[in-house]
Image: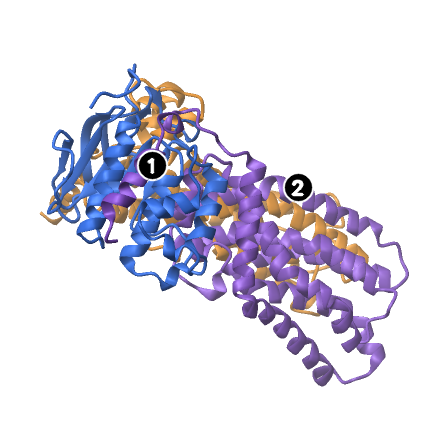
Amino acid sequence: MTPPHAPAAPLLSASRLAFSRNDEPVFGPLNFSLGRGETVLVEGDNGSGKTTLLRVLAGMLPASSGDIRFDGIPASRDARNGRVLWLGHRTGMNESLSPRENLAFLAGLYGTRAGQNPDTAMAAVGIEAWIDEPLRTLSAGQKKRVGLARLRLLPGDIWLLDEPYANLDRYGIDLVNHLVAEHCRAGGAALVTSHGAVRFADPNARHIHLVA
Amino acid sequence: MASLTQTVDRGTGTMDVTAVARSSRRPGTWRACRALLRRDFVLAWRRRGELFLPLLYAVIVTALFPFALGPEPELLGRIAGGVLLVIVVLAMLPALEAMFRADLEDGTLEQWLLAPQPLALLALTRVIAHWITTVLPLIVVMPLLGALLDLPMKVLPILIVTLLLATPLIALLGAVLSALAAGARRSGILLALMLLPLVVPVVIFAAGAIAAAQSGMPYLAPLTWLAAALVLAIVLAPLACAAALRIAVES
Amino acid sequence: MLRNGQAGVVGERAWKWGRVPEHPGFRNMSRSYVPHFIHWLGSPPNFYRFAGNVRPWLMAAALVCAVIGLYGGLVLAPPDYQQGDAYRIIFIHVPSAWMSLFIYAAMAIAGLVALVWRVKLAEVIAMECAPIGAAFTLITLLTGSLWGKPMWGTWWTWGARLTSELVLFFLYLGVIGLYNAFEDRRRGARAASLLALVGIVNLPIVHYSVVWWNTLHQGSTVNLFGHSSIAPSMLWPLLVMALATHLYFFASILGRARTGLLSLESGKQWVRQLVTDTSR
């Protein structure tokens, strides 16, 4: 798997990154980097700080120490925004709106990948039939797939996926793996958390293991 | 679902390298604001039943005043302007509290924060959508409420102009407080407690304009002050609101 | 790993402010920008010890000043030619009113530091200012009301000063209420600090608008210091009382910040050490 661009600096790198909540260390210090075409799997038990690590990388929580760089540039809103796609525990979409309306709104904020629109994105995750139904009528797994459609639709080379396998059936898990692999082939990178128990597509993916 | 491989294959061809590259097309801020406005209007339309609640509240409270004070037109007419002003402020409160709460709970704010758009402008757009959907109807029914309280006809236009300046100002201040309170536990009275000191000047100048118009005195000065404060708030409040939203998302 | 003594978190914010520290982290940042003593004091254990040492002296000085000021004001100063002895409440009322504003300013400055540099000590100080400030504001309102009864024949008047003070009281209550509505105290402190900053922009506007409103309504505005010069025999006790309230405030905030830090840092080594040392 050769990245199409030869990167001078990794897309995302962290050095001596640590986070403490109320002075209890949650994770770290961690050193890692994420280059183009790379996937890093963050493993650990519940409460080991996987979600926190992703939130720190996304700038939603301030690191307690250490630093984060995007393309070698110290993290800032300008360096980060628009490049990071976030898939968290919460859907990030309004329950009263349909997937089409939700995706159209996010496309308005983020823009779209070339050739993509809400229809193609929903088709790629196999639930195009629900595109005009209010989100609240969809099952948990279907909502998760709408979240995956968001990844398809929006540009952004760094994917931060927090437990993307939760609520998904076998086909859904394959779908996540496929999307991640495809994204990495296209020059992107992904950081994926999992509490284990999921077979990950890319056998070469690096692992970060967090201990509670 | 049956044809996973098929759906996946359909996707492969279209995912293209350049789209991922750094220079992928960022939508302009104007387009983002329009998308947000459209979304908020659609959402308001889906829940249009809720939009009538502030109106209903205003009508009920207005109708209670004559019973409490007696139906003499002179008395009612004299206090009508100030009473309607206070009723509008109170009717705005419940909706203000909910301005960001749902978006925080379903994770939409996380998407706002990571979007390549200025958060303050998104917040300002939200305030505009909020004002149009929840406050504008209150101003539209002012002639009706004014009639219930025998508001002199010559004061009505001034009352409406005053409200057109004062309510956006209150909505902007309320947005900051609503964003601050969104990260906290639910507590109904908190927003009112925080809002009271901030709306005192607004109410003073708005009521001053109305009272001046009623007694035939020049009312332009307080209106100008309101307009100046509104301009100031349009610049500063979204910045404070964005800072508050960042605190709210941090958890 | 973050360990004891590290006062705050800088990370990304430092870059935002145009400084690229070689090693991000509060220690290094502050070393180059803040005088060494303040940097040293920013560390909770150091502050805890320093405050514990200074507080008794401040409190004693406050008491001495209060006794001198009250003796000067209540005994030595002559009765006012118009108000008789009733004016003597100004020796409580006026210093309290000054403190209510001074503490709000202190809270806002600490809040600004807390928001921009995320210094834990600043968060604690800002939040511990609020109850003290609210108390002084309440004292101002109550003594003003007590003074108003013999002077104007009413407990409450919507005069410009009293109304502004009432609004200030609500600002304090809002800060306290917001802070307590958060589960996470540090997040609550930052949210409430932002509210305090919004309030400080608001305060002059409130005061101006209330003055305007008062002149408009030709109400019972009574100018408390109509005679522009105050007799020296009345002035010096007033100034001594002002000094006493300031000293009391500093003693009080040091004490409150100590307990605040103890509970925030309860998991840390220096607090554990402290507990084992004192219980032995």
Q: Colour of chain A?
A: blue
Residue A26 image position (x, y, % from top left): 20, 41
**Which residue is drawn at the image coordinates 77% and 67% (left, top)?**
B81
Q: What is the secondary structure assignment of the residue under circle 1?
A: loop
Residue C177 image position (x, y, % from top left): 44, 58
Residue C212 image position (x, y, % from top left): 76, 52
Residue B55, image quadrant: bottom right
Q: What is the secondary structure assignment of the residue under circle 2?
A: helix
Q: Which residue is mark 2?
A: B232
* The C terminus of chain A: image quadrant: top left
The chain in purple: B
Mark 2: amino acid: Leu
At label 1, counting other C-alpha atoms closer than 10 Å, the crowd grade (few under 14, some 14-19, many 20 or more) is many
Q: CA distance from mark 1 to mark 2?
A: 32 Å
Figure disc tally: 2
Q: Residue furthest left?
A: C280
Q: Name the mark nearer the viewer: 1 or 2.
A: 1
* The N terminus of chain A: image quadrant: top left
**Which residue is drawn at the image coordinates 53% and 49% (left, top)?**
B176
**Which residue is drawn at the image coordinates 89% and 58% (left, top)?**
B217
Same chain for labels 1 and 2? Say yes or no: no
The chain in orange: C
Q: Which residue is mark 1?
A: A58
Using residue B30 as the reference point, say whether residue A124 is left or right of it: left
Nearer to us in this view, A97 or C215: A97
Chain to which the residue tagged by mark 2 belongs: B
Residue C58, image quadrant: top left
Mark 1: amino acid: Ala
Q: Is residue C193 visible?
A: no
Q: Is residue B222 visible?
A: yes
Nearer to us in this view, C149 or C211: C211
Chain to which the residue tagged by mark 1 belongs: A
